[in-house]
Amino acid sequence: MQRSQLLDRLAQPRRYDLAVIGGGATGLGVALDAAARGLSVVLLESHDFAGGTSSRATKLVHGGVRYLAQGNLSLVREALHERTTLLRNAPHLAQPLAFIMPAYRWWELPFYGVGLKAYDALAGAAGLGRTEFLGRGEALQALPTLRGEGLKGGVRYWDGQFDDARLAVALARTAAREGALVVNHCEVTGLAHEAGRVIGLHARDRETGRTFQVQAGCVVNATGVWVDALRQRDGEATGRAVRPLVTPSQGVHLVVDADFLAGRQALLVPRTADGRVLFAVPWLGKVILGTTDTPRDDLPREPQAQDAEVDFILSEIGRYLVRTPTRQDVRSQWVGLRPLVRPGQEEAGATRAISREHTVQTSPSGLVTVTGGKWTTYRAMAEDVLAHCADQGLLDPLLTESKKGVTTNLHLVGAQAADRANDLGQPPGLHLYGAEAPAIQALPGADRVLGGGLTEAMVRFAARHEYARTVEDVLARRSRLLFLDARLAADLAGEVAALLRQETGADPQEADFRTLAGTYLPAAEGPAMTSA
Ligand SMILES: Cc1cc2nc3c(=O)[nH]c(=O)nc-3n(C[C@H](O)[C@H](O)[C@H](O)COP(=O)(O)OP(=O)(O)OC[C@H]3O[C@@H](n4cnc5c(N)ncnc54)[C@H](O)[C@@H]3O)c2cc1C
């Protein structure tokens, strides 16, 4: 996979059936589905695949107990079924996980237990395991570091977890395998119009500055929280006022060492002081704590955690654990922006009450915009988008309809035999590469561990086969080290940069990565990293 060849393909004059803007869960899902149906597809991502919200999830493949509490049963049912599909199609990157909801008051057991039994019922045959009531001793056996004082018992239910950024890369590569042209670090700078209709887009390679014009019968704006920027430009080009669709809300996650949550099961806090659910989830040898839900009115690429959000997570989770984690225990923190869809501009209120279901709409110019939803339902969302495009006459309805459902049983690149179950609770390593592990072992440096489960061969593989161009691409999303241990990630930046220079000949942006890594630690710890 040579980048220069990808860009040469992009420069060729041709008209694609579909151009997708944005390489997060949503855009990649649409590109893969369309390519698998036989459409000609191009997808452009301005930064890196999953560089936006899609690498910053809680990593749950879930129906969503909080949506259950809101009575949003159709969303929960769809997500529970998609959960099973994802686990089947990417078993190297997604797996079932048991969650324990502890009860410190007697009424909580029947109250939450009945709700979680309903979760089972909605899953039906797609269930991953039976919801069970646990006695006090059983709950402590499952989560040995759970606070025992006052504990009455618990409820165990099943959901899934995954590696979000690696899943995005697997989607990109699978879409390419199905014939799509997918290019990261290539920004869509504008839309091309003819007689008031969108007929394509303008793009710019962020590495070289080379520019491109791409023609397409259908253009899908899947730029997550950033969809309104392109909608705005579309409106300006066609002389229409455009009302913003998205209101962003940020979610903070903290990562601490595994011993804070001993055992291999996750903890669900059913109701925090501000009335939400909070998780402690074992993931890749660490524990993820989160998340928050804080409205904001800007859309930075790298949103920062507020001190109050960090303290809130530490203190809320600390109420449930024998040892309360402190800021000094945080190995990494990251922030994602939720693209929440506004029901209407005039409606105000807490962001957590705003729809998390996705929205697909077409502007008068024919620009199709999709936003909202969740990672778990990316595949179903893609089907919806293509059906919408066909309804609007932007794609051939015969082709799209006859091949509908083609991704239901489409294994993603790297999917290994189903009997080789993976353990995403284990520290990172070759197991995340599924069926591709032997290909990595055959590369130079297979036995040279740089740190954090990352080998020289993995960096080479990332550059040769996984579209990685920068130190950040490798350490944030091919390996997840930035999200697991920001200090260690900064320590490895130099070696990763040297390998990337050998592999790509391009500037791997090492200094930018060191600065970024400094922002992935709570404020008191951050500044020292930048001078490393
Ligand atoms: C804190 C948090 C926790 C979450 N946890 C979960 C979870 O546990 N499970 C779950 O199922 N869901 C979860 N979600 C939801 C899920 O992560 C999102 O719904 C999903 O990632 C959104 O994907 P997207 O592709 O729409 O957006 P993004 O991932 O943001 O992708 C949009 C992409 O468009 C690109 N882009 C922008 N402008 C341009 C341009 N001009 N040209 C080219 N590209 C451009 C951006 O760089 C970006 O990569 C969570 C969300 C948040 C915020």
Image (tube, grey):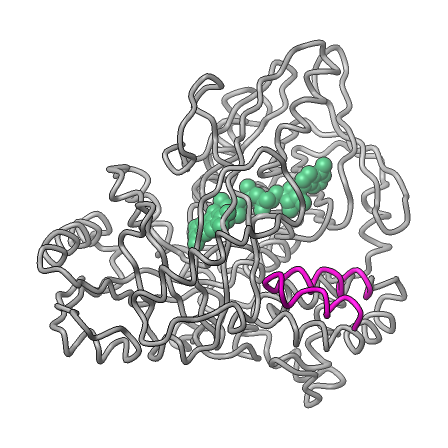
Q: In the rendered view, does 73 fall on the left or right side of 511?
A: left
Q: Please name the residue shown 71% across and 68% down the image.
A: 462
In the rendered image, which quarter contains the C terminus? bottom right
Secondary structure predominantly adopted by residues drawn in magenta: helix
418 in magenta: no
523 in magenta: yes
Q: Please name the residue shown 22% across and 80% down the image.
A: 141
Q: Please name the residue shown 40% across and 61% down the image.
A: 87
Q: In the rendered view, does 511 fall on the left or right side of 434?
A: right
Task: Give the image quadrant in which the ligand numbered 1 is located.
Answer: top right
* Whether residue 130 can be seen here: no
Vertically, is 355 above or below 504? above
* Whether residue 484 can be seen here: yes
Residue at the bottom extreme of this rendering: 447
Q: Please name the residue shown 46% across and 36% down the image.
A: 402
Q: In the rendered view, does 475 fall on the left or right side of 511?
A: left
Q: Where is residue 219 in the image (x, y as percent from the top left)?
A: 66, 29
Toward which corner of the image does residue 196 lie, by quadrant? top right
In the rendered image, which quarter contains the N terminus? bottom right
Q: In the rendered view, does 419 fall on the left or right side of 9?
A: left
Q: How many labels does the image show?
A: 0
Q: Position of residue 112 (x, y in %)?
A: 17, 53
Vertically, is 195 above or below 42? above
Which segment did they paint magenta? 510-532
